[in-house]
Image: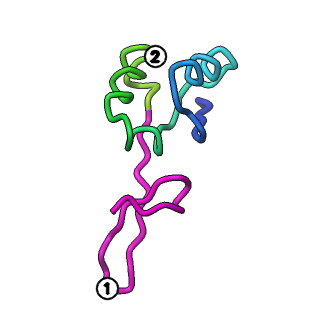
């Protein structure tokens, strides 16, 4: 079973540290909103199969979905 980690990954230093620690997949969320090209950078470095993008969303009382970052605490709209 592959070990995946997400949370606080801001740059390639973070990614490389995790991979060297034995993590097989990194999960990106908050960092991609400010830097969408980070997905490609990570994927090119460690491979597409080891790069996971997570999109958090919540549905409001009217049934409308809203995208969030930072563990579901910050609305991206």
| Badge 1 density bin: few <14, some 14–19, many ≥20, Cα 10 Å | few
C-beta proximity under 8 Å, tags 2 and 1: no
Q: Is residue 48 magenta?
A: no
**Residue shown at 37% from the left, 60% from the top:** 67
Query: In this orientation, which residue lies closer to the viewer: 9 or 63?
Result: 9
Instruction: Tally the marks.
Output: 2
Q: Quadrant of the C terminus?
A: bottom left
Return the residue found at the far right.
21
Q: Residues within 10 Å of mark 2 (few under 14, many from 20)?
A: some
Judging by the rendered image, the residue that carries numbered circle 1 is 62
Magenta span of residues: 52-77
Q: Position of residue 50 (x, y in %)?
A: 46, 25
| Helix, strand or loop at mark 2 | helix
Q: Is residue 59 above or below residue 6?
A: below
Q: Quadrant of residue 51?
A: top left
**Residue ID at (58%, 16%):** 16
Q: Which residue is mark 2?
A: 46
Q: Is residue 42 left or right of residue 15?
A: left
Q: Is residue 36 left or right of residue 1?
A: left
Quadrant in the picture for residue 20: top right
């Amino acid at each position: 079973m592959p070990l995946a980690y997400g949370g606080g990954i801001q740059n390639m230093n973070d990614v490389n540290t995790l991979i060297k620690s034995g993590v097989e997949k990194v999960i990106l969320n908050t960092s991609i909103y400010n830097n969408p090209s980070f997905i490609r950078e990570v994927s090119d470095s460690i491979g597409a199969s080891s790069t996971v993008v997570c999109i958090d969303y919540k549905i409001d009382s009217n049934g409308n979905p809203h995208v969030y970052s930072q563990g579901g605490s910050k609305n991206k709209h």
